[in-house]
Amino acid sequence: MEITDTQEVWRPSINPWLSVVPIMLAIFMFALDETISNVALTYIAGSMSVSLNESTWVLTSYLIASGIAIPLVGFMSKLFGRKNYFTLCLIVFTFSSFMCAVSHSMVEIVLARFIQGLGGGGLLPLGQAIMMENFEPKDRPKSMALFGIAIVFAPLLGPILGGWITENWSWPWIYLINISLGFLCVYLCHRLLEDPPYAKKQKKVNIDVWGLVFLVIWLVTLQIVLDKGNDEDWFGSAWICKLTVISVISAIGFFIVQFKNKDALIDLSILKDKTYFFGTFIQVILMGVFLASAALLPSMLQRLLGYTAYLSGLSMGARGIGSILGLITYLVLSRFIGDRRVAMIGLGALGLGSLFFGMISLQINLGTIALPNILYGMGIFLALTPLIPLSLSTTPNEGMTNASGLQNLVKNIGGAIGTSISTTMVSRFAQVHQHLMTNHLNYTNEFFNAKINMMAQTFSQFTDYATAQAMAHGQIYRELIQQSTLWAYIDTFRWFAFATFMLIPLLAFIKKPKNVYK
């Protein structure tokens, strides 16, 4: 009991606001590299002489590796000490960034990105745990506001910065910019971070071998299924079915081992905490909606309006403005109405932004979509920033690393599943709307006949009438595909709004901490 009391009152000897600097830089680099490669895939594929589909493994390998690294945070922190492990993660991340830049084949860059994900995967949960523990409970909302800036703003800046660097310099520079920042972070970590007694290096640390094996198989197969499932018609493909079965069995095996093993990678008993469970569940759905929308919007602008990669990335800039407005709003409102009500406002803004996207047309431009994007950026910040400290408010300091590791693992999986499901929804909804519209495009419809004849007469000025009629039918078909695709995006964004609004009642299950949050 004496140890517990010591753990609870431990405070760093260095001003905790100084320790924020290396943590924020490290998390910003990791979050930025999740999306900075997106708009450079075409250039990478060209320089490596591979197809665009093959180049997506540059993204997938990073996500797989970071997903594997997150559950290892607790074990590795005990093995090396948390400060040492955080520094090691930075060194691995920085070195692998250099390896990405000098790669000359797809195998080399995929391997380098995998190592980069292994190094970067531990930065987010470690940084979150350190910032939660270094600050007193009354200052945690402010620290998590800064934390939220990095995890929300960096992925939005990634496509814009990546597009600009790729077009003005070359794609290797999107990785080379990490090197100077990485060395700076390592130096600052050495000077400004320190471990509490319970986070120092421990002796006789046992690793959960079977848990690690099941985890790797589960996450690797799951990511492949999510990444390639839509292209292969999901369960219409035999190999997708086989990988899904392997993934499910591995997931079940992983959780069984975690419950039974005393030296488990993750202590799942934390899920018995109602505040932690519902707070984490809401964040998982939030990340699914947020990352899925971030993937769909540039795709929609490129497919329907012919935007370039840079312009489609630039369209996300308004979310950064929304994040800044969210920071200001959070710092003001949290003093008066409390974090749970701020989270409710954030969920409402996010749902409202999805509704606005659910009313778009082909006459949209960058200015038209600025408002819903601002609502998205503001909403995700106002919702996510208070939810992180709220969900961990009932977790003791010695369990913070384990809790933040599990939370970031499931958020990572939720984001991957959300992105994959949204892509499938657009594909399926487009087929449905195409079928519904086709029913009206036949010669029993007088408006259809009139449109075909009018267009054929226009085209006949340049060719014979038979060819003109074929051109008229081709034009109608292109409009059919365009309109059905537009409605597919509209329906998907409306489902995003529904999912977001349904999260608001779950806030009632999150306990209101005494003397900390209102």
Image (cartoon, rainbow, N blue to C red):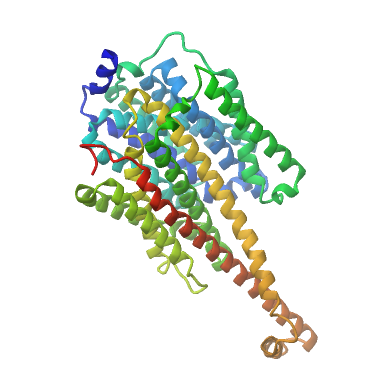
Tell me residue 142's x, y (percent): 25, 41
Task: Please state if 333 lies on the left or on the right of 314 as rendered.
Answer: left
Can you say which quadrant of the picture contains the C terminus?
top left
Question: Which residue corresponds to the image point at 37% horizontal and 25% vertical from the top-left?
Answer: 399
Task: Please state if 338 lies on the left or on the right of 159 as rendered.
Answer: left
Outermost residue to the top: 204
Task: Please state if 287 lies on the left or on the right of 254 as rendered.
Answer: left
Decide which of 284, 471 is in the foreground and name it: 284
Tell me residue 69's x, y (percent): 50, 29
Tell me residue 368's x, y (percent): 42, 69
Quarter holding residue 20: top left
Can residue 318 be seen in this snapshot? no
Decide which of 123, 2 is in the foreground and name it: 2
Quarter holding residue 350: bottom left
Tell me residue 442's x, y (percent): 74, 82
Question: Which residue corresponds to the image point at 44% horizontal and 64% vertical from the top-left?
Answer: 355
